[in-house]
Structure formats: structure tokens, C-alpha cells
Image: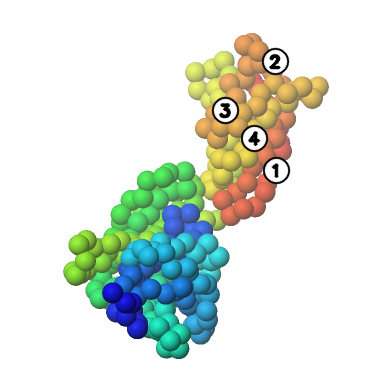
Amino acid sequence: MSSPDTAEYIYIRLATVAEDNGSIDLTFLVDTNFETTEYLLYRKENSKSYYLYDKIPYSGKSTIQYTDDNVDVKYNRYFYRLAVKDGCGVREKRSNEASPVYLTLKTEDNVNIICRTNYIGWDTVESYNLFRRHESSDEWEQIAVLGWNEYYYSDHLSAIPHLTESIYYRVDAVEGPTVFSESLVSNSNYVVYTRKGEIWLPTAFTPQSDINNVFKPYSTFIKSEGYTFQIYNRMGLKVFETTDLTQGWDGTFKGNYVQQGAYVYVIYCTFSDGTSHVQKGTVVVVN
């Protein structure tokens, strides 16, 4: 049986942003009864025009997976169309347009305002589910379901428990009723709320007392990676060091309480906004 002169269909089934915000994954459905040499992938950014972005070789498979890792989803929204030329190599049959939800974030008066676009590519979207997580957690918590005409959500910072680190937001678009066997879910890019970190430390502590017996920094919006907390005596000998944000000094060195007096502390860290920070000072050990 000879190949038809043109493809009966060519369709972008899914466009979704990868979890690390580093790529966009695309799923194409193509008519394999029409044998061609290649498919043409067109892309555009934001409100610009489409251009030929890549050529995908014909594989004989009806489902094609494609990853676009040349993206910056923090600052750009991406749109895609797939095309195939007819048997004469003249006319193109183009797919539907597809684009994941694009999120932006602004903060006003201690309120995070998350703005979303629509998912483009499906006949209908059942819901837009908004998720939030803390920087140190891998678990996303669903905080809202946005209707088709709800493009903004206000998240009050005063209502967020344990707000000591960056907050991530993303939206999942859930496909509505479809002719396919199952509805799909598309991830948006994630957006991040952060601010410059702060560190507070007491000026003295009493290691051998029942209270105030551990010298520990209290901090907000500090990354755990690259954190170091050190203590030195007046001779310059390091008596304590940790890379654990939750750990403090109990006033001992090699199992024995140190002498009363002033000790120097040094903290090396990176704030959640990417700023490198070194903080030095003294603490008085009172026995």
C-alpha cells in the first residue's frame, strides 16, 4: 500500500515544564501512514513570530517525545507548532499550537501575587491547581484551585508558617474531557519568593547553666549549602565548627568546658537571594 500524499493529522499532545525549570517536554502524535523524512518544529518566544527551531527525523513511531532544554522559563514564555510537508515537499500541514502555563510573581504590601496564563493546546482545561513549597522541602502543597477566569492569586506572607526560607510556587493545568484515553497534566514554570537573609546571635551564654546554654545563630532566608559556623579562642585556635544550620556550640572543646571569656565567631553562608555573606563577632562565655 502506497503512502498517502499528506499526513492526516499532526498534534501536540502535551507541553510541560520540567520540575527543575530547565527544559520543556513535548509530546507529539503523528500519522505514521504518511512516510516523510522529517518533522519541522517551530517555536516562538513571548509575542515574537514563529521560526523554524529544529528538525526531527522520521522514526515510524506515532508518539514522539522531545525535550527543549534551550529555554529560560524564568523570563520567557514559549509556544510550539509541529509541521510536516506533503509528498511533493511543498505544502506544510501544521499542528495545533501548544504552550505551558507561564507564571509570574510580584510582592506588594507583604502579599505574594501570583499571575498565570492559560494552557494552550487542549480543547478544555478542567482546573488550574496552585502549589507551594518551602525551599528545603521536596513536597508541594496544593493551596488553591483556580477557575478558568481566575488569573491572579494573593498569598499573604503573614499566614505562611515558618517563613524563614524561599517559597516556590507552580501551577498544574489539568486537561478537561478529551477524546483520548486519559486526561493529562501540564506543569508551569515555578516562581520563587525570596529576600535578603538575616542572622542574629546573642552576645553571651552560660554553657553550664540550665538555660541559655547553647550559642547558636538564628537566621532567615539562608541556604544550607555552603554554610559554615566556626568558633575561635583568643589564641586563634578553632574550638568548634559545623555546617549544620540547626547546630550550635555547647561551650565545650574536646569534651571539656572552655574557660570563661570572649570568643570569636565566623559565619560563612549564602542568602536565599544568592548573596554571599560573611559575619564575624564575639561572644562571651560565662561560667
Q: Counting other residues with Cα less than 10 Å from the Cα at mark 3, is it few (<14), some (14-19), or many (20 or more)?
A: some
Q: Residue at x 23, y 63 (%)?
A: 183
Task: Give, as a three-letter code, the residue at label 2.
Answer: Gln
| Label 3 to label 2: alpha-carbon separation | 18 Å
- According to the picture, the residue beneath numbered tag 4 turns out to be 228
- The numbered mark at residue 259 is 2
Nearest-to-viewer mark from 1 and 2: 1
Instruction: Residue under label 1, please give it.
Output: 278
Q: Earlier in the sequence, mark 3 or mark 1?
A: 3
Q: Is residue 269 above or below residue 75?
A: above
Q: Earlier in the sequence, mark 4 or mark 2?
A: 4
Q: CA distance from mark 1 to mark 2?
A: 26 Å
What is the residue that sits farthest to the top in this orientation? 256
Secondary structure category for the residue under label 3: loop
First along the sequence among labels 1 and 2: 2
Given residues 196 and 2, the one toward you in this image is 2
Residue 27 in picture, x, y percent from top left = 37, 65
Separation of marks 3 and 4 at Cα, in angstroms? 11 Å
Looking at the image, residue 16 lies above or below residue 281: below
**Quadrant containing the C terminus in the rendered view:** top right
Q: Please tell me whether mark 4 or mark 1 is closer to you in this view.
A: 4
Q: Which residue shows up at 63% across the image and 40% down it?
A: 226
The amino acid at mark 3 is Gly
Query: Mark 3 = which residue?
Result: 248
Q: Is 169 placed left or right of 253 in the picture? A: left
Identity of the residue furthest to the front in this view:
1
Q: Are marks 4 and 2 in contact (CB under 8 Å)?
A: no
